[in-house]
Image (spheres, grey):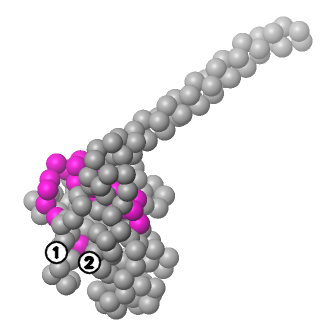
Amino acid sequence: MGSSNTSGLPSQRLALSRRTLLGASVGAAGLFALRPFAALAATGPRNISFVNLHTGEKLNCCYFEGADYNTGELARIAKVLRDHRSGDVHPIDNRLLDTLHRLRGALETDKPFHVISGYRSPVSNAKMATASKGVAKKSLHMEGMAIDIRVPGVDLMNLQKAAKTLQAGGVGYYGESNFVHVDVGRVRYW
């Protein structure tokens, strides 16, 4: 009986050491995952370009400069990314803009994002969800937290892969419809 307790003790220590090591690894991985966001703050001005494929509107702007977001440019972005069905305008989440800025850097392109869908009003989203199983009833588009895009000259699979490497939220591949969905909700892929 005494020897079984003694022989179990090293395995308990080993299990504890493994848990500690695993916890440290996960913590370190979390720090590495945050580095791109920390580095983003030190990179200076953040520019972004859009072409709304439904309205034909184009926008190339610096939405962040110095130490703050440019509210005038954020308003212009919201207008270009408005619900083209209803005309409703909604603020676009700054995290989504920063993710797109990082995505553009990862792709090493200065081409504009071609926008299939930015903000969607709840009414538009409900109509779309009724007509298609591919539209979420509680879509992050309604919160200004999601966008459906493609980039001229960038293969759609490469766009999807680059978006996934950012681990900033959801990334969906819609090859038949020729776009990639990017959002700043929880990290998930489809």
Badge 1: few (under 14), some or many (20 or more) residues near its Cα, within 10 Å?
A: some
Which quadrant of the figure contains the N terminus?
top right
Query: Element type at marker 2?
Result: helix
Badge 2: few (under 14), some or many (20 or more) residues near its Cα, within 10 Å?
A: many
**105, above or below 83, in the image:** above
Which quadrant of the figure contains the C terminus?
bottom left
Q: Please check the rendered image and state whether residue 105 is part of the magenta-colored stretch, yes or no.
A: yes
Q: Residue most toward the front? A: 66
Q: Amino acid at mark 2?
A: Val
Say which quarter of the image contains residue 179: bottom left
Tell me the chief SS of the magenta region: helix
Residue 119 at x, y percent in the picture: 36, 77
Q: Please check the rendered image and state whether residue 111 is part of the magenta-colored stretch, yes or no.
A: yes
Q: Amino acid at mark 1?
A: Lys
Mark 1 lies on residue:
58
Q: Is residue 160 visible?
A: no
Residue drawn at 36 percent across, 60 percent down: 69
Label 2–label 1 contact, CB within 8 A: yes
Q: In the figure, is residue 24 to the left or right of 156?
A: right
Q: Whole-Å distance between the Cαs marked 2 and 1?
A: 7 Å
**25, above or below 57, in the image:** above
In the foreground, 89 or 157: 89
Q: In the figure, is residue 133 to the left or right of 59?
A: right
Which residues are the magenta region? 93-115
Mark 2 lies on residue:
80
